[in-house]
Amino acid sequence: MIGLFKVKEKQREQAQNASRGGGASVKKQSAGELRLHKDISELNLPSSCTISFPNGKDDLMNFEVSIKPDDGYYHNGTFVFTFQVSSVYPHEAPKVKCKTKVYHPNIDLEGNVCLNILREDWKPVLSINTVIYGLFHLFTEPNSEDPLNHDAAQVLRDNPKLFETNVRRAMTGGYVGQTFFPRCI
């Protein structure tokens, strides 16, 4: 508790100095930023996931997560997701997009992600860690029952071997139907 008082006191001093022109101003953090900072400091990622901050550590509200599944259809692929977190987080789910073009039933060709905890099942008790594990799970267990890419979902349901062939072709840089997928393996 004493440490908290010292931090507040120091912030007050810095703000006073800034108002007198004696230093940089102190940016007040929103509740969402404070919660996100806590979530990031408590991340417990699988070894095949990494987080990066392309805009620097001062912009925690926008970051990227790379997922490299170690088994399943997407084994050894690298998939990058962007996270945009609003200032009202955790009352609103982060906006997540897949930057890597991927042949997947739950990710469309524009990078939109179909994951229930990013939509109707979001609750403020969930965290960034939960979202990353949810994304990781999409690669180990693609869900053909709740698709965004209906063609991929139908192939997964009707012909899993063809689905596996299509995933490999897409990941090594090739066409699936009329759609070209850049190499991600």
Image (spheres, helix red, strand yellow):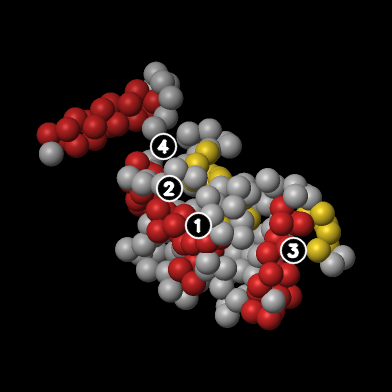
Q: Is residue 93 above or below residue 145?
A: above
Q: Is residue 53 visible?
A: yes
| Distance from the alpha carbon under mark 1 to that under mark 2 | 9 Å
Q: Quadrant of the N terminus?
A: top left
Q: Amino acid at mark 1?
A: Phe
Q: Secondary structure at mark 3?
A: helix
Q: Secondary structure at mark 4?
A: loop
> In the rendered structure, which disc, 4 or 1, sits on the residue that comes first in sequence?
4
> In the rendered structure, which disc, 3 or 2, sits on the residue that comes first in sequence?
2
Circle number at residue 180: none
Residue annotated with mark 3: 166
Q: Amino acid at mark 3?
A: Asn
Neighbour tally class for label 2: few under 14, some 14-19, many 20 plus, Cα within 10 Å: some
> In the rendered structure, which disc, 4 or 3, sits on the residue that comes first in sequence?
4
Residue annotated with mark 2: 46
Name the residue: 53% across, 50% down: 70
Q: Amino acid at mark 4?
A: Lys
Residue annotated with mark 1: 136
Determine contact: label 1, label 2, CB under 8 Å. yes
> In the rendered structure, which disc, 1 or 3, sits on the residue that comes first in sequence?
1
Name the residue: 60% across, 64% down: 113
Picture coordinates of residue 48 (x, y %)? 49, 45
Picture coordinates of residue 61 (x, y %)? 49, 47
| Distance from the alpha carbon under mark 1 to that under mark 3 | 20 Å
Neighbour tally class for label 1: few under 14, some 14-19, many 20 plus, Cα within 10 Å: many
Name the residue: 61% across, 69% down: 106
> In the rendered structure, which disc, 4 or 2, sits on the residue that comes first in sequence?
4
